[in-house]
Amino acid sequence: MSSYTLRCVHCGDEVPEHYTTACPRGHASLLRADYAEKQLNVMKAPGIFRFSSWLPVHGSLPIDAGPVCYKSEALARELNLPNLHIGFNGYWPERGGTIATCSFKELEALPTMVRVRENTTDTLVIASAGNTARAFLQVSALTGVPVVVVVPEKSLARLWTTVPAEKACVIAVRGDYTDAIRFSREVCSLPGFIEEGGARNVARRDGMGTVMLDAAVTIGRMPDYYFQAIGSGTGGIAAWEAAVRLREDGRFGQALPSLHLSQNLPFVPMVSAWNDHRRTLVAETDMPDASSAISRVFSDVLTNREPPYAIPGGVFDAMSATGGRMYAVTNDEARAAGNLFTEHEGIDLDPAAAVAVSSLIRACETGSIDTGRTVLLNITGGGYERVREDHALIPVHPAFCVPAGATAEQVKKELAKLVNHV
Ligand SMILES: *Cc1c(COP(=O)(O)O)cnc(C)c1O
Ligand SMILES: [Zn+2]
């Protein structure tokens, strides 16, 4: 249970909460949740909702998925990092990891579903290429709250839950992720539907920010360095915002952790812009041959063409405020790092998490961090092999398929039926 107000980062004005994702004065800026409680009050609640006082929700869900933080021994020894802490966000019950869909996107989906229910009667629409879709389908399955999920057709194989998703409507688009995003906007132009909002959704960011909160509470202080692989960079923004709140709390240190964020070659737009000291992304310079580059990465969840990089309160500001660094990792480096992690820590990784591990290895080798200090490595996904031992994975089939570029008009009837039905 929290008490919060929304504020525009650009103008500072208070913004009324109706699941609002933009400043009503038209500023191209993120909104932020301003919590009444300035000290983190960790509650006796399951999973992520123990951090409810810093989530933009009043209620909670009886679901025990949440962030897990532990001190590494084997990998720490291997890398000669005596203060390496791992934020594990996936399925690994032996360590307390119960995120059944295996990525930190569930940390976003849980508070978002509560925020939606508390502020609007509209049906939530999510465009995703995989992990986000699975997370929202799972939370819909567990809560019975309807969602519309729009995915590129080739991502359908990644859509599964561990409980039947009876109130979920999946629309497959014959095209890529960008086509799926366009069609989801079409759906949101119809009455009764609302866009999830991505980085603009404060529940997404503050949900992801619980990885930093959990680490600070577990370690007893904020880490000095935060490592994460990014596609949109929302998790990096979230870690920074959580750290700013922890600094204000006063009990977890005054220095903000520096963000060490990584992308997967050959698609590394934010690394390119940041290393050029530029606030704006330039498509020709930062993502040449984008489609071809995207098709060649090991981790395709890291391939967002429109990340919230330049926007006030976005990735550039987060990197600047924390003295951050960015890393570009090759497929081979990521695979090798992922194997090293599994060998030492004993759990399989999402390819994106392997990219983050690789960036940490690079940081140690190049001296870009002081190896004696406290490191938080965000393992943003893992346990895909482990979850199969405990759960049957139930595929989620699309309600219908549309061609790229379809309009909502063309599917209005089907959608209306679905919404009445859900
Ligand atoms: C989405 C995702 C990321 C990237 O997260 P952002 O902070 O939104 O860029 C990293 N790892 C995994 C497993 C993801 O699903
Ligand atoms: Zn504003």
Image: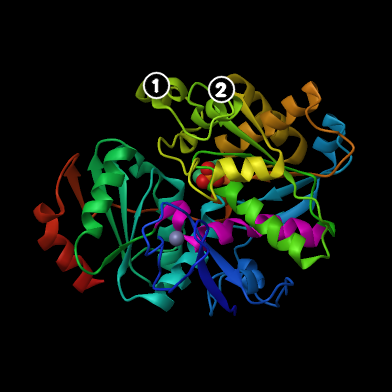
Q: Can residue 327 be seen here?
A: yes
Left or right? Give the position of 374 relative to 358.
right
Q: Where is residue 76? Give x, y as percent.
A: 84, 37
Q: Where is residue 202? Give x, y as percent.
A: 50, 62
Q: Nearer the viewer, mark 1 or mark 2?
A: 1
State the CA–CA distance, disc 1 to disc 2. 22 Å
Secondary structure under the numbered disc 2 in the rendered image: helix
Asked where in the image residue 54 lies, by quadrant, the reply is: bottom right
Q: Where is residue 85? Give x, y as percent.
A: 79, 47
Asked where in the image residue 179 lies, by quadrant, the reply is: top left
Q: Residue at x 79, y 54 (%)?
A: 222
Looking at the magenta stretch, what is its main secondary structure?
A: helix
In the rendered structure, which amino acid carries the disc numbered 1?
Answer: Glu
Tell me which segment is drawn in magenta.
197-218
Q: 21 or 131, which lies in front?
A: 21
Is residue 201 found inside the magenta-colored segment of the image?
Answer: yes
Q: Quadrant of ligand 2?
A: bottom left
Q: Residue at x 76, y 60 (%)?
A: 247
Q: Where does label 1 land, which residue?
A: 284
In the rendered structure, which amino acid carries the disc numbered 2?
Answer: Asn
Q: Where does label 2 land, which residue?
A: 331
Q: Quadrant of the N terminus?
A: bottom right
Left or right? Give the position of 331 relative to 192.
right
Label 2, residues with CA under 10 Å away: few <14, some 14-19, many ≥20? many
